[in-house]
Amino acid sequence: MVLQQAINGGITTFQFREKGKNALSGQAKIELGHRLRRICKDYGIPFFVNDDIEIVRELEADGVHIGQDDSDIREIREMFPELLIGLSISTTEELHVSRWDLADYLGVGPVFKTSSKDDAKEVIGIEGLRFIQEQVPLPVVAIGGIDESNAQQVRQTGAGVSVISAISRSEQPNETVKRLKK
Ligand code: TZP
Ligand code: MG
């Protein structure tokens, strides 16, 4: 399975993001979450839940990641004072209207063109990524269209790298992760 192979390749964090077309819901989603959570626990990989605060406790998540249109970060911080919280930021405007100071890290992008998110905002490029990094004293994890051809460029900014399709669609996720980290 992809997660197991990605762990073998050296991923350092996993986010459970079961959404979009053909996504599981209800009990099936929770069951999948438990399976993935188990694997992460076995390998000491921090497990984050995307958006769905209802399943955070049940899956004993280490963190929650929310976007601009999800629950208010103030509520999330109150509900989960002990968890890590990530907040998505796509533009400087979003920074200005967000309580990013309540987050532990920012997810910034899309840095490059992506086909994994239907409602992705405009591509910000490496320059946009750097610009947002300069404005906040928080760790930044870059997202959007990151693959083997551009991961190094992203890492040079000091940002972390988060990836969906380059790993999940790879025939050899293990090798892909190794190359992404080179
Ligand atoms: N947020 C901004 S772009 C994106 C998300 C969730 C999708 C990233 O997926 P991929 O396949 O790595 O481009
Ligand atoms: Mg979201």
Image (cartoon, rainbow, N blue to C red):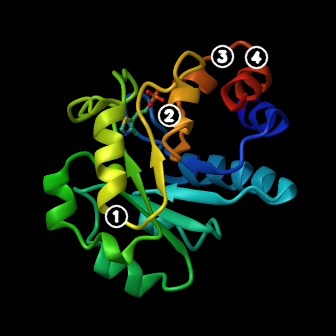
Some atom of ligand 1 lies within 8 Å of the CB belonging to the residue at label 1: no
Where in the image, quadrant-wise, is ligand 1 located?
top left
Q: Is residue 173 visible?
A: yes
Q: Alpha carbon of mark 3 to alpha carbon of mark 1: how far? A: 33 Å
x, y percentage for residue 67? 31, 55
Up-down: is 177 above or below 74? Answer: above
Badge 4 marks a residue whose secondary structure is loop
Identify which amino acid the numbered label 2 is placed on: Val
| Disc on the earlier residue, 2 or 1 | 1
Q: Alpha carbon of mark 2 to alpha carbon of mark 1: how far? A: 17 Å
x, y percentage for residue 17? 49, 45
Up-down: is 129 above or below 27? Answer: above
Query: Which residue corresponds to mark 2?
Result: 154
| Disc on the earlier residue, 3 or 1 | 1
Q: Mark 3: few, some, or many residues within 10 Å (few <14, many ≥20)?
A: few
Badge 2 marks a residue whose secondary structure is helix
Q: Alpha carbon of mark 3 to alpha carbon of mark 2: how far? A: 20 Å
Query: Which residue corresponds to mark 3?
Result: 170
Query: Which residue corresponds to mark 1?
Result: 136
Marks 2 and 4: which is nearer the front? 2
Q: Alpha carbon of mark 2 to alpha carbon of mark 4: how far? A: 22 Å
